Amino acid sequence: MKETRDYLNRIGMPTGDLYTLPTSEKRFEDGGQYRFEVPGIQGPGAMKALLEALDGYGIQIHRVTQTQGIMRLLDSEIEQMLEYAQKWNVELLLATGPRATIDTSASVNTPEGVRMGYRLRGQEQIVRAVEDIRRAVKLGVRSFMVYDEGQLWLMNQMRKDGFLPADVKFKVSAHTGHGNPCSAKLLEQIGANSFNPVRDIQLQMLSAIRAAIDIPIDIHTENPKSTGGFIRHYEVPEFIRVAAPIYLKTGGSVAATHSWDTTEADAKKRAKQVALVKRVIDEYYPEAIVSPK
């Protein structure tokens, strides 16, 4: 294996998982090591309930992510979510709508087909996915979650060519199934502004990914039952230390599935999960720097 590891070293990639867990010196542009993201907020009612509940805890978050898809939202709902984003000074991130699981695919619902994830079948679905994003862009949204590497490549080209605004940002979902430094590097090269590795990524693997890329890493501090249901709050201080800059995706254990239709009561439970994670950070890594609002 030495020759392979030597080659990886020559091209600037980690030669293996980093069991030494070096401290990341990389930061967000504002100097922060970490930010909070709450996923699965599917509409304005849940978003408002979440942000009001977080006010009660005295906690700021940085991202609210909708996961069901733009095509599931009315224009008026998107506009209302944008108003809340502006009021609470958070980034609103919407998910691409068409995906294999709601296409006419039969294979995606088989044991073998789950490997497709939420990727797109056929060029018509690529066109529709781009149209989904263009619709939200016209309404003022600038941050999007994508599930398909080809779609990411295309939208990055569109951004370069001025077909999409230059300030549009793309986050790659954990549902694409990537979990190694080489895949992370590829996604960064084709336009990802942040990258969510697989949910059960281990610290030494996460550390190697951080060594390979400069964009923020999105990491689940907990998960819905459908994706393992594990809660990793006590690992969060080390997530921050080895993988900064990092988005802490928190609140997922409240949901049964990725596209759970979060109620206002559920949103308040997600806010509590953020408070629980913040307690662990304050206790075990109090010097960690959170991005300002």
Image (spheres, rainbow, N blue to C red):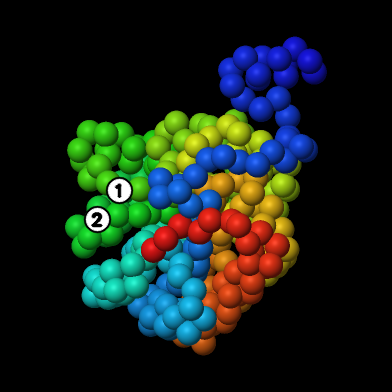
- Observer-nearest of 129 and 108: 129
Which numbered dot is residue 136?
none
What's the residue at 75%, 12% (across, down)?
3
Callout count: 2
Quarter of the rendering containing residue 132: bottom left
Outermost residue toward the right?
A: 1
Q: Is residue 159 above or below residue 60?
A: above
Residue 21 point in image, percent of width and height: 72, 41
Secondary element at tag 1: loop
Q: Quadrant of the C terminus?
A: bottom left
- Observer-nearest of 4 and 17: 17
* Disc number lying in front (1 or 2): 1
- Observer-nearest of 120 and 85: 85
**Residue 44 horizontal side relative to residue 16, left or right:** left
Q: Amino acid at mark 2?
A: Val
Residue 51 point in image, percent of width and height: 42, 78
Label 2 environment density (alpha carbons within 10 Å; few <14, some 14–19, many ≥20): some
Residue 242 point in image, percent of width and height: 65, 45
Question: Does the rendering let one see residue 8?
Answer: yes
Dots 1, 2 in contact, CB < 8 A: yes
What's the residue at 63%, 67% (across, down)?
282
* Mark toward the start of the polypeptide (1 vs 2): 2
Outermost residue toward the bottom?
A: 265
The CA distance from mark 1 to mark 2 is: 8 Å
Quarter of the rendering containing residue 88: bottom left
Secondary element at tag 2: helix
Q: Amino acid at mark 1?
A: Val
Q: Which residue is the site of mark 1?
A: 168
Outermost residue toward the top?
A: 3
Q: Which residue is the site of mark 2?
A: 137
